[in-house]
Amino acid sequence: MSVSSQDLDSEQDQCLRRGSRFLHFLTGSDRFLASSVLTFMNAQVVMRLKWVLENIAEMDKLIAGGRVRFGTLDTWIVHKLTQGKVYASDYSNASATAMFDPFLKEWSSFVLRFLGIPNLIFPELRPSCGDWGTCHPSVCGAALPITAVVSDQGASLAGGGGHSRGHLKITLGTGAFMNLNTGEQPLATVCGIYPVVGWQEPKGRVVFMAEASALDVGTVMEWGQRVGLYTDVTETAAIGASVPDSGGVYFVPAFQGLQAPVNDSTATCGFMGIKAVTTRAHLVRALLDSLSFLVYQMFEAMLDEARQPLLDARVDGGVSRNELIVQQIATLTQRRLTRYTTTQLSAQGTAVLAGLGAGVHKSASAVDALLVVERVFEPEASERPRLLLHYARWKKTCARFGAWTSSFEGQL
């Protein structure tokens, strides 16, 4: 009998969660509460690293000889830019690997021991802002200093002015990311929202985020175009708004499963409620509604677990140009959503943090002077009861599409 990688991931998830819950019970430490909600998926770098270590025969010999190094994308880029002089990762990128302990701000010895991964192959950890070496002249034509390295979501939060505790940022791009600034303390939850580092400043101040994500936002929009529901994604808001609602049709956006707070990697995609009178516009509206509902589901979990106020939010990313989706999110969350003229908040945040690392800026709040508001989406109170009714029905639909892959694997 063959064992799939998904089965292995599931077994490791269960073992880690049980062990972490037991240690949390014994110690009361939020470190183990946080690790109890870790979910390993094939797409994660930690599982690819584990596969390499277990399936390439010469790895043990190469590791013993000091010839194996692990790194995140930033590690590789900086290593190349400096021609091998800097081998490091910043805290924000490291915290996205599932192998980083945000409470101790170091590689997680607990997770590494559990997975059997040697810690000697990991890079040095550095603050996001500061001295990251010098870009070699052969790359940029001059010896330029590198003064910031930061993850895309941390940079996006900083770039949108989310530099204070309680600031909320929603990115609608390839995936959906909801990041809450939790200040200088990591937040442990029980529903799969994991604490990560947003960025670390030169003087040592660490800004933590609670992060929830969904993987299939851009994928859903591209799929709808590919199957002929529309010829261009820019048409979708108008098509969706041409009908009052989805006509009882609901769509589950789960090409890669459903993430927190559902945490079902075996969920599948599909429509439910199609009738003889269903039109193309109803299907498009169901697609758009599903993305609004997905974000609101993350918001509900964040609101329940955060134990702190959630302020009005910034929204960015390519899909944030779809005004129907964003307006529904504003109405459901009862929060004002601000969209800026630039959708490249990650680039803007990185630039400001680089200025902080170079001593040009005194704090991340320097970004405020660069922000130009394009539109503010106000909650529409009269629409909320109707949306909540459809949201409740959508959640029931998601439950019908859960545990699909594991139920049918090997039978087809």
Image (cartoon, helix red, strand yellow):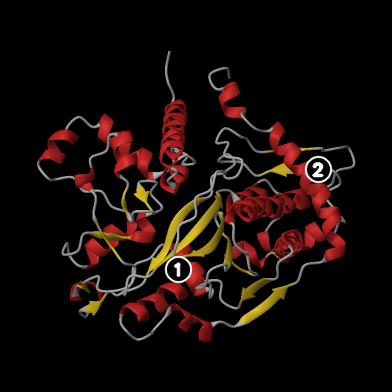
Whether residue 271 is visible? no
Circle 1 is placed at which residue position? Answer: 155
How packed is label 1: few (under 14 Cα within 10 Å), some, or many (20 or more)?
Answer: many
- Residue at 79%, 58% in the rendered image: 239
- The reply to whether the C-beta atoms of the residues labelled 1 and 2 are less than 8 Å apart is no
Amino acid type indicated by mark 1: Ala
Which residue is farthest right?
Answer: 277
Nearest the eye: 232 or 166: 166
Of circles 1 and 2, the one toward us is: 1
The dot on residue 249 is 2
> Residue 330's spot in the image, x, y percent?
72, 64
Left or right, residue 260 beside residue 102: right
The dot on residue 129 is none
Left or right, residue 63 beside residue 276: left
| Above or below, comparing residue 48 to residue 79 in the picture | above
- Residue at 38%, 84% in the rendered image: 362
Left or right, residue 304 beside residue 345: right
> Residue 383's spot in the image, x, y percent?
85, 61
| Above or below, comparing residue 71 to residue 137 in the picture | above
Amino acid type indicated by mark 2: Val
Q: Kindly indicate the quadrant of the structure image that contains residue 80.
A: bottom left
| Above or below, comparing residue 349 to residue 396 in the picture | below
Quadrant of the image containing the N terminus: top left
